[in-house]
Amino acid sequence: MAIGLQLENEKQLLKQYYAGQRMESPNDGFLILLGVRAGQGGSAVALLECSASSLRYEITIPKATRTERKKVKDALEAGEDPDCPRHGPGHRLVRAGKDLVCTDCGVAYAKV
Ligand SMILES: [Zn+2]
């Protein structure tokens, strides 16, 4: 069940999201991240609130791709602490149950 409105430019917003940039709201203002929750099939959903209208939006954060999983697996096998393939260096993946997840994406990139 969706609790937020959908956004039309999800792809562009996701890029800004991963880069830690300010995300512009469709109704002036910008989007404030309220939280990330698990979605379906390994994806996640970010809940955002518009700073001007207080309308709430959701964007789906796609599940890890095969390439991203491999990158993380390679780092693990090399004995490194993998970073989030989307957020980049400095965003360490953390252990959540049997998964290695990025707390900003809410996406699991590897099994541990
Ligand atoms: Zn991330």
Image (cartoon, helix red, strand yellow):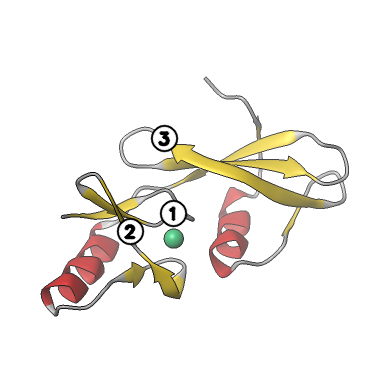
Q: Between residue 85 and residue 34, name the one nearer to us.
A: 34
In the rendered image, which quarter is residue 67 located in?
A: bottom left
- The local crowd at label 3, few if under 14, some if 14 to 19, many if 20 or more residues have their Cα within 10 Å, is some
Amino acid under label 1? Thr
- Residue at numbered disc 2: 94
Q: Where 38 falls versus 94 (above or below)?
A: above
Residue 39 circle label? 3
The answer to whether mark 1 and mark 2 are in CB contact below 8 A is yes
Q: Position of residue 100 (x, y in %)?
A: 27, 55
- The local crowd at label 2, few if under 14, some if 14 to 19, many if 20 or more residues have their Cα within 10 Å, is some
User: Quick one: label 3 or label 1, which is nearer the N terminus?
Assistant: 3
Q: Secondary structure at mark 2?
A: strand
Farthest residue to the left: give it: 77
Q: Is the C-beta of the residue carrying label 2 under 8 Å from the nearest atom of ligand 1?
A: no
**Distance between the alpha carbons at the discs numbered 3 and 1:** 14 Å
Q: Between residue 39 and residue 37, name the one nearer to us.
A: 37
Q: Secondary structure at mark 3?
A: loop
Location of the C terminus (image quadrant): bottom left
Q: Residue at x 29, y 64 (%)?
A: 68
Q: Residue at x 17, y 71 (%)?
A: 76
Q: Position of residue 108 (x, y in %)?
A: 31, 51
Amino acid under label 3? Gly
Residue 103 circle label? 1
Q: Is the C-beta of the residue carrying label 1 under 8 Å from the nearest atom of ligand 1?
A: yes
Q: Secondary structure at mark 1?
A: loop
The answer to whether mark 2 and mark 3 are in CB contact below 8 A is no
Q: Between residue 13 and residue 104, name the one nearer to us.
A: 104
Q: Residue at x 24, y 67 (%)?
A: 72
Amino acid under label 2? Val
User: Quick one: label 1 or label 2, which is nearer the N terminus?
Assistant: 2
Q: Closer to us: mark 2 or mark 3?
A: 2
